[in-house]
Amino acid sequence: MEKKNIDWSSLGFAYVQTDMRYVSNYKNGAWDDGCLTDQANVTMSECACVLQYAQTCFEGMKAYTTQDGHIVCFRPDLNAQRMAASCRRLKMPVFPEDRFVKAVVETVRANAAWVPPYGSGASLYLRPFMFGSDAIIGVKPATEFQFRVFATPVGPYFKGGIKPLKLRICDYDRAAPRGTGHVKAGLNYAMSLYAIVDAHEQGYDENVYLDSGSRTFIEETGGANIVFIKGNTLVTPKSDTILPSITRRSLVQVAKDYLGMEVEEREVALSEIGDFTECGLCGTAAVISPVGTIVDHGKEIHYAGFGPTIQKLYDTLTGIQMGRIPAPEGWIEVIE
């Protein structure tokens, strides 16, 4: 397969339209067979439920070219599970998990020429998503839905590539107890847009959100989970309102099984973040990005940036994804 003529190393994290995407529609209580299409635009009623009441959820994942030339995807079964959980919480029909994985594979295979070559630093980002498509004017769930998967080649998530990030403790809340913070709902991200634009205008890369109940515990950032390092211990915040990151889950296993680290998944108090030596943001888009500084209303807490442990976590996880290091069983979906 001849690759597209793209300067892969100059890609940012932005949408580039590729050749094909997968579409399946839900109507009269059942999903249709689904298919690939070259049509990138979506046509729907002006009163579509997604436009009126934000009934939508999504996933994010990547396909890579490995060291031996295979095209693979990283743990798509977990994305399928997480989307199913999001659908149940938002009163949307679950797209069957086996069909989800098959749709992802078909989309990647149909866009193989867009998968960046090994060593380019880029990847093919995949966005499975679902939305209520029929006209709903009263406040209630839709009865018709569309599931889609599109692909776009991307570079680093954070502007300027991988470098120590500067974060701030945010005065806004990301999610409420018993709310939707634990699912990947579009509405969660809409409410964070004001805060992230304000953070960027103030010179920060991201916001660190606290629990909305007591505002004393660290939760996550607007686009990634957060992890801390102290000695040989990886510490990850635990909360019912944190999105269960697949990358964080994978890093926990990498830390235990590959690096011999201790792992603590627990509440992390704002008052203790100065006790850690390293800090990182983890997620599909970011993998694990080093944090250099967290600013708490004028008080600066500094970390080692790309310290030795964050570096080892990054090298090991990306090594698994790229085929340089043997992967645990079931982690790699070989597509070609």
Image: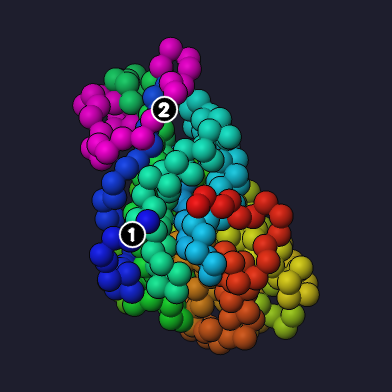
Q: Nearer the viewer, residue 292 or 84?
A: 84
The residue at 40%/73% (across/down) is 120
- Crowding at dot 1, Cα within 10 Å, few <14 / some 14-19 / many 20+, comes out as few
Q: Is residue 310 left or right of residue 169?
A: right
User: Where residue 89 appears, x then y in whole percent?
Assistant: 54, 33
User: Where residue 110 appears, x then y in whole percent?
Assistant: 38, 45
User: Where residue 59 appears, x then y in whole percent?
Assistant: 47, 46
- Quarter of the image with the N terminus in it: bottom left
Corner quadrant of residue 258: bottom right
Q: Which mark is residue 34?
A: 2
Q: Nearer the viewer, residue 4 or 298?
A: 4
Q: Nearer the viewer, residue 96 or 184?
A: 96
The residue at 58%/60% (across/down) is 247
The stretch drawn in magenta includes residue 278: no
Q: Which residue is mark 1?
A: 2
Q: Quick one: label 2 or label 1, which is nearer the N terminus? A: 1
- Crowding at dot 2, Cα within 10 Å, few <14 / some 14-19 / many 20+, comes out as some
Q: Are marks 2 and 1 in contact (CB under 8 Å)?
A: no
Specify the segment rendered in magenta: 27-54
